[in-house]
Amino acid sequence: MRALVLMVMGTMLISPTLRRRIQDRQKQSRPILAAAAGTAWHITQDIYGIIAGTNYRLPKPVSLAFLAAVAASCIWLAGLNWYMAFAFGLSATLGVYLRWRQIRRRRTLELAESWPGYLEQTRAKMLASSRSLPYVIFEQNSIASPFLSELIQHGRREFENSGSLEKALKTIWLAADNEEATSYVCNALCTTLGSTSSQIENQLSAISGTVRSRNELKQETNSRLAGVRTARIFILIIPAGMALAGLSFAGSIKPFLTTASIWQILAALLVLSICWYWSSRLMRFPAWPTQMLRDMSYEVQEPA
Protein backbone atom coordinates (compact mmCIF):
# COMPACT_ATOMS: atom_id res chain seq x y z
CA MET A 1 0.00 0.00 0.00
CA ARG A 2 2.83 2.40 0.86
CA ALA A 3 4.54 1.63 -2.42
CA LEU A 4 1.34 2.40 -4.29
CA VAL A 5 0.97 5.76 -2.52
CA LEU A 6 4.63 6.52 -3.24
CA MET A 7 4.07 5.80 -6.94
CA VAL A 8 1.02 8.07 -7.02
CA MET A 9 2.92 10.89 -5.32
CA GLY A 10 5.85 10.51 -7.71
CA THR A 11 3.51 10.67 -10.68
CA MET A 12 1.86 13.83 -9.35
CA LEU A 13 5.22 15.51 -8.76
CA ILE A 14 6.61 14.57 -12.17
CA SER A 15 3.46 15.45 -14.11
CA PRO A 16 4.09 19.25 -14.17
CA THR A 17 7.46 18.71 -15.88
CA LEU A 18 5.79 16.59 -18.54
CA ARG A 19 2.99 19.10 -19.11
CA ARG A 20 4.71 20.98 -21.94
CA ARG A 21 5.62 17.80 -23.79
CA ILE A 22 2.07 16.55 -23.48
CA GLN A 23 0.73 19.82 -24.87
CA ASP A 24 3.22 19.77 -27.75
CA ARG A 25 2.31 16.26 -28.74
CA GLN A 26 -1.41 17.05 -28.44
CA LYS A 27 -2.50 13.46 -28.10
CA GLN A 28 -6.24 13.24 -28.05
CA SER A 29 -6.03 9.82 -26.42
CA ARG A 30 -4.66 11.28 -23.13
CA PRO A 31 -6.78 14.30 -22.18
CA ILE A 32 -7.02 13.17 -18.55
CA LEU A 33 -3.24 13.04 -18.14
CA ALA A 34 -2.82 16.50 -19.68
CA ALA A 35 -5.54 17.93 -17.44
CA ALA A 36 -4.01 16.34 -14.34
CA ALA A 37 -0.57 17.71 -15.24
CA GLY A 38 -1.96 21.21 -15.75
CA THR A 39 -3.92 21.11 -12.50
CA ALA A 40 -0.91 19.88 -10.53
CA TRP A 41 1.23 22.60 -12.08
CA HIS A 42 -1.21 25.40 -11.16
CA ILE A 43 -1.69 24.06 -7.63
CA THR A 44 2.08 23.88 -7.10
CA GLN A 45 2.45 27.45 -8.37
CA ASP A 46 -0.29 28.70 -6.02
CA ILE A 47 1.23 27.06 -2.96
CA TYR A 48 4.77 28.16 -3.82
CA GLY A 49 3.55 31.72 -4.45
CA ILE A 50 1.92 31.85 -1.02
CA ILE A 51 5.03 30.51 0.72
CA ALA A 52 7.28 32.90 -1.20
CA GLY A 53 4.99 35.86 -0.49
CA THR A 54 4.11 36.67 -4.12
CA ASN A 55 0.56 35.28 -4.16
CA TYR A 56 -1.94 37.25 -2.07
CA ARG A 57 -5.14 35.61 -3.32
CA LEU A 58 -7.08 33.18 -1.15
CA PRO A 59 -5.83 29.62 -1.83
CA LYS A 60 -8.38 27.41 -3.49
CA PRO A 61 -9.82 24.48 -1.52
CA VAL A 62 -8.33 22.13 -4.14
CA SER A 63 -4.86 23.53 -3.47
CA LEU A 64 -5.25 23.14 0.30
CA ALA A 65 -6.58 19.60 -0.08
CA PHE A 66 -3.68 18.74 -2.40
CA LEU A 67 -1.15 20.09 0.10
CA ALA A 68 -2.76 18.22 3.00
CA ALA A 69 -2.78 14.95 1.03
CA VAL A 70 0.87 15.27 -0.02
CA ALA A 71 2.06 16.24 3.47
CA ALA A 72 0.07 13.45 5.15
CA SER A 73 1.28 10.90 2.60
CA CYS A 74 4.91 11.87 3.21
CA ILE A 75 4.55 11.36 6.97
CA TRP A 76 2.69 8.09 6.46
CA LEU A 77 5.35 6.81 4.07
CA ALA A 78 7.98 7.67 6.67
CA GLY A 79 6.47 4.99 8.89
CA LEU A 80 4.32 7.00 11.32
CA ASN A 81 0.71 6.25 12.20
CA TRP A 82 -2.23 7.57 10.21
CA TYR A 83 -3.32 10.03 12.88
CA MET A 84 0.17 11.58 12.99
CA ALA A 85 0.06 11.87 9.20
CA PHE A 86 -3.38 13.47 9.39
CA ALA A 87 -2.19 15.95 12.04
CA PHE A 88 0.87 16.86 9.96
CA GLY A 89 -1.23 17.38 6.83
CA LEU A 90 -3.66 19.57 8.75
CA SER A 91 -0.77 21.56 10.23
CA ALA A 92 0.78 22.12 6.80
CA THR A 93 -2.53 23.36 5.42
CA LEU A 94 -3.06 25.65 8.41
CA GLY A 95 0.47 27.01 8.03
CA VAL A 96 -0.10 27.93 4.38
CA TYR A 97 -3.41 29.56 5.23
CA LEU A 98 -1.84 31.61 8.04
CA ARG A 99 0.96 32.62 5.67
CA TRP A 100 -1.66 33.89 3.21
CA ARG A 101 -3.35 35.86 6.00
CA GLN A 102 -0.02 37.44 6.89
CA ILE A 103 0.66 38.46 3.28
CA ARG A 104 -2.89 39.82 2.95
CA ARG A 105 -2.58 41.95 6.10
CA ARG A 106 0.80 43.33 5.01
CA ARG A 107 -0.57 44.17 1.56
CA THR A 108 -3.64 45.89 3.01
CA LEU A 109 -1.47 47.96 5.35
CA GLU A 110 0.97 48.97 2.62
CA LEU A 111 -1.78 49.97 0.19
CA ALA A 112 -3.62 52.01 2.82
CA GLU A 113 -0.40 53.84 3.74
CA SER A 114 0.72 54.39 0.13
CA TRP A 115 -2.47 55.80 -1.42
CA PRO A 116 -2.44 59.22 0.34
CA GLY A 117 1.09 60.04 -0.80
CA TYR A 118 0.36 58.84 -4.33
CA LEU A 119 -2.76 61.01 -4.60
CA GLU A 120 -0.92 64.03 -3.25
CA GLN A 121 1.83 63.55 -5.83
CA THR A 122 -0.82 63.31 -8.55
CA ARG A 123 -2.39 66.56 -7.34
CA ALA A 124 1.00 68.27 -7.34
CA LYS A 125 1.62 67.15 -10.93
CA MET A 126 -1.75 68.50 -11.99
CA LEU A 127 -0.90 71.88 -10.46
CA ALA A 128 2.55 71.95 -12.07
CA SER A 129 1.61 70.75 -15.58
CA SER A 130 -2.01 72.00 -15.88
CA ARG A 131 -3.05 68.68 -17.40
CA SER A 132 -6.12 66.58 -16.69
CA LEU A 133 -6.28 63.72 -14.21
CA PRO A 134 -6.26 60.78 -16.72
CA TYR A 135 -2.94 61.91 -18.21
CA VAL A 136 -1.24 62.52 -14.86
CA ILE A 137 -2.39 59.77 -12.53
CA PHE A 138 -0.39 56.97 -14.21
CA GLU A 139 2.83 58.94 -14.84
CA GLN A 140 4.48 58.18 -11.50
CA ASN A 141 7.13 55.49 -11.74
CA SER A 142 8.87 55.63 -8.35
CA ILE A 143 6.45 53.98 -5.90
CA ALA A 144 7.71 52.67 -2.59
CA SER A 145 5.11 49.92 -2.18
CA PRO A 146 5.49 47.03 -4.65
CA PHE A 147 1.80 46.20 -4.22
CA LEU A 148 0.68 49.69 -5.24
CA SER A 149 3.18 49.70 -8.10
CA GLU A 150 1.64 46.48 -9.42
CA LEU A 151 -1.86 47.97 -9.28
CA ILE A 152 -0.77 51.15 -11.07
CA GLN A 153 0.85 49.09 -13.82
CA HIS A 154 -2.43 47.23 -14.38
CA GLY A 155 -4.30 50.54 -14.59
CA ARG A 156 -1.70 52.08 -16.91
CA ARG A 157 -1.92 49.19 -19.37
CA GLU A 158 -5.71 49.35 -19.43
CA PHE A 159 -5.67 53.13 -19.94
CA GLU A 160 -3.17 52.83 -22.80
CA ASN A 161 -5.35 50.20 -24.49
CA SER A 162 -8.80 51.73 -23.96
CA GLY A 163 -8.14 55.40 -23.18
CA SER A 164 -10.84 55.27 -20.49
CA LEU A 165 -9.98 56.22 -16.91
CA GLU A 166 -13.10 54.45 -15.64
CA LYS A 167 -11.97 51.13 -17.12
CA ALA A 168 -8.47 51.68 -15.75
CA LEU A 169 -9.88 52.26 -12.27
CA LYS A 170 -12.07 49.18 -12.58
CA THR A 171 -8.99 47.18 -13.56
CA ILE A 172 -7.15 48.47 -10.47
CA TRP A 173 -10.12 47.52 -8.32
CA LEU A 174 -10.24 44.00 -9.77
CA ALA A 175 -6.50 43.55 -9.31
CA ALA A 176 -6.77 44.75 -5.69
CA ASP A 177 -9.22 41.91 -4.97
CA ASN A 178 -11.63 43.91 -2.76
CA GLU A 179 -8.95 45.65 -0.72
CA GLU A 180 -10.88 48.33 1.21
CA ALA A 181 -8.69 51.42 0.78
CA THR A 182 -8.21 50.74 -2.93
CA SER A 183 -11.95 50.21 -3.44
CA TYR A 184 -12.67 53.51 -1.73
CA VAL A 185 -10.05 55.39 -3.76
CA CYS A 186 -11.27 53.94 -7.08
CA ASN A 187 -14.89 54.72 -6.24
CA ALA A 188 -14.02 58.26 -5.12
CA LEU A 189 -11.91 58.90 -8.23
CA CYS A 190 -14.80 57.79 -10.43
CA THR A 191 -16.98 60.47 -8.85
CA THR A 192 -14.43 63.14 -9.87
CA LEU A 193 -14.82 62.42 -13.58
CA GLY A 194 -16.49 65.31 -15.37
CA SER A 195 -15.43 67.89 -12.78
CA THR A 196 -13.19 70.86 -13.45
CA SER A 197 -9.46 70.78 -12.75
CA SER A 198 -9.77 72.87 -9.59
CA GLN A 199 -12.56 70.65 -8.28
CA ILE A 200 -10.55 67.51 -9.02
CA GLU A 201 -7.55 68.95 -7.18
CA ASN A 202 -9.68 69.68 -4.12
CA GLN A 203 -11.26 66.21 -4.30
CA LEU A 204 -7.85 64.53 -4.53
CA SER A 205 -6.80 66.37 -1.40
CA ALA A 206 -10.03 65.31 0.34
CA ILE A 207 -9.62 61.67 -0.70
CA SER A 208 -6.02 61.48 0.53
CA GLY A 209 -7.03 63.20 3.78
CA THR A 210 -9.85 60.72 4.33
CA VAL A 211 -7.58 57.72 3.79
CA ARG A 212 -4.88 59.17 6.03
CA SER A 213 -7.30 59.99 8.86
CA ARG A 214 -8.83 56.51 8.63
CA ASN A 215 -5.36 54.95 8.85
CA GLU A 216 -4.65 56.94 12.01
CA LEU A 217 -8.01 55.95 13.51
CA LYS A 218 -7.41 52.30 12.70
CA GLN A 219 -3.95 52.43 14.25
CA GLU A 220 -5.36 53.96 17.43
CA THR A 221 -8.12 51.34 17.57
CA ASN A 222 -5.63 48.49 17.14
CA SER A 223 -3.45 49.85 19.93
CA ARG A 224 -6.46 49.93 22.28
CA LEU A 225 -7.43 46.38 21.34
CA ALA A 226 -3.91 45.02 21.76
CA GLY A 227 -4.64 43.84 25.30
CA VAL A 228 -7.86 42.15 24.22
CA ARG A 229 -6.07 40.30 21.42
CA THR A 230 -3.37 39.18 23.85
CA ALA A 231 -5.99 37.85 26.25
CA ARG A 232 -7.70 36.03 23.39
CA ILE A 233 -4.56 33.97 22.80
CA PHE A 234 -5.23 32.19 26.10
CA ILE A 235 -8.27 30.66 24.40
CA LEU A 236 -5.75 28.57 22.49
CA ILE A 237 -3.03 28.21 25.14
CA ILE A 238 -5.21 26.92 27.99
CA PRO A 239 -6.88 24.03 26.06
CA ALA A 240 -3.50 23.02 24.64
CA GLY A 241 -1.98 22.99 28.13
CA MET A 242 -4.87 20.94 29.49
CA ALA A 243 -4.45 18.43 26.64
CA LEU A 244 -0.73 18.07 27.41
CA ALA A 245 -1.51 17.61 31.11
CA GLY A 246 -4.05 14.91 30.31
CA LEU A 247 -1.57 13.21 28.01
CA SER A 248 1.05 13.16 30.75
CA PHE A 249 -1.41 11.57 33.22
CA ALA A 250 -2.61 8.98 30.69
CA GLY A 251 0.93 7.95 29.74
CA SER A 252 0.02 7.42 26.07
CA ILE A 253 -2.15 8.84 23.33
CA LYS A 254 -4.30 5.72 22.95
CA PRO A 255 -7.10 6.85 25.35
CA PHE A 256 -7.57 9.92 23.15
CA LEU A 257 -8.05 7.85 19.99
CA THR A 258 -11.29 6.14 20.90
CA THR A 259 -14.43 7.02 19.01
CA ALA A 260 -15.94 8.97 21.90
CA SER A 261 -12.70 10.88 22.51
CA ILE A 262 -12.36 11.87 18.86
CA TRP A 263 -15.93 13.16 18.74
CA GLN A 264 -15.35 15.14 21.95
CA ILE A 265 -12.16 16.66 20.52
CA LEU A 266 -13.94 17.63 17.31
CA ALA A 267 -16.80 19.21 19.27
CA ALA A 268 -14.34 21.18 21.40
CA LEU A 269 -12.50 22.40 18.30
CA LEU A 270 -15.82 23.44 16.75
CA VAL A 271 -16.78 25.47 19.84
CA LEU A 272 -13.29 27.00 19.93
CA SER A 273 -13.54 28.00 16.27
CA ILE A 274 -16.97 29.57 16.77
CA CYS A 275 -15.74 31.60 19.75
CA TRP A 276 -12.68 32.75 17.82
CA TYR A 277 -14.75 33.79 14.82
CA TRP A 278 -17.27 35.61 17.01
CA SER A 279 -14.55 37.55 18.83
CA SER A 280 -12.88 38.42 15.52
CA ARG A 281 -16.11 39.91 14.21
CA LEU A 282 -16.51 41.98 17.39
CA MET A 283 -13.01 43.42 17.02
CA ARG A 284 -13.24 43.98 13.27
CA PHE A 285 -12.70 47.55 12.13
CA PRO A 286 -15.80 49.02 10.41
CA ALA A 287 -15.83 48.76 6.62
CA TRP A 288 -15.46 51.75 4.34
CA PRO A 289 -18.80 53.54 3.81
CA THR A 290 -18.69 53.29 0.03
CA GLN A 291 -20.45 51.44 -2.75
CA MET A 292 -18.21 48.98 -4.55
CA LEU A 293 -17.64 49.13 -8.26
CA ARG A 294 -19.51 45.93 -9.08
CA ASP A 295 -22.46 47.88 -10.48
CA MET A 296 -20.49 49.60 -13.25
CA SER A 297 -22.04 49.01 -16.64
CA TYR A 298 -18.88 48.22 -18.61
CA GLU A 299 -16.98 44.98 -18.59
CA VAL A 300 -13.24 44.71 -17.97
CA GLN A 301 -11.09 41.61 -18.10
CA GLU A 302 -9.60 40.70 -14.74
CA PRO A 303 -5.79 41.01 -14.77
CA ALA A 304 -3.82 37.82 -14.65
Image (cartoon, helix red, strand yellow):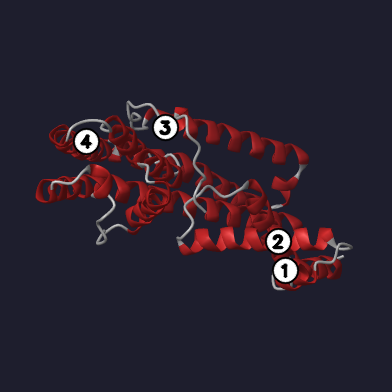
In the depicted structure, whether residue 281 falls above or below residue 176: above
User: Which quarter of the figure has residue 2?
Assistant: bottom right
56 or 240: nearer the eye?
56
Disc 3 designates what residue? 293
Q: Residue furthest right?
A: 29
At label 4, which amino acid type do we have?
A: Ile
User: Which quarter of the figure has residue 208?
Assistant: top left
- In which quadrant is the N terminus drawn? bottom right
Q: Disc 4 versus disc 2: distance between alpha carbons?
A: 44 Å
Residue that appears at 23% across and 38% down: 211
Q: Disc 2 versus disc 1: distance between alpha carbons?
A: 6 Å
Q: Position of residue 182 (x, y in %)?
A: 34, 41
Which numbered mark, 3 or 1, is in the foreground of this view?
A: 3
Horizontal side of residue 167 vs 29, given as left or right: left
The dot on residue 161 is none
Q: Position of residue 24 (x, y in %)?
A: 75, 71
In the depicted structure, whether residue 181 falls above or below residue 290: below
Q: Position of residue 18 (x, y in %)?
A: 74, 72
User: Which quarter of the figure has residue 168?
Assistant: top left
The dot on residue 19 is 1
Residue that appears at 23% across and 43% down: 133
Disc 4 designates what residue? 207
Does residue 259 show up?
yes
Q: Residue furthest left?
A: 128
Q: Disc 3 versus disc 1: distance between alpha carbons?
A: 38 Å
Horizontal side of residue 187 vs 59, given as left or right: left
Helix, strand or loop under label 3 = helix
Disc 2 designates what residue? 38
Q: Residues within 10 Å of mark 4 (few under 14, many from 20)?
A: many
At label 1, which amino acid type do we have?
A: Arg
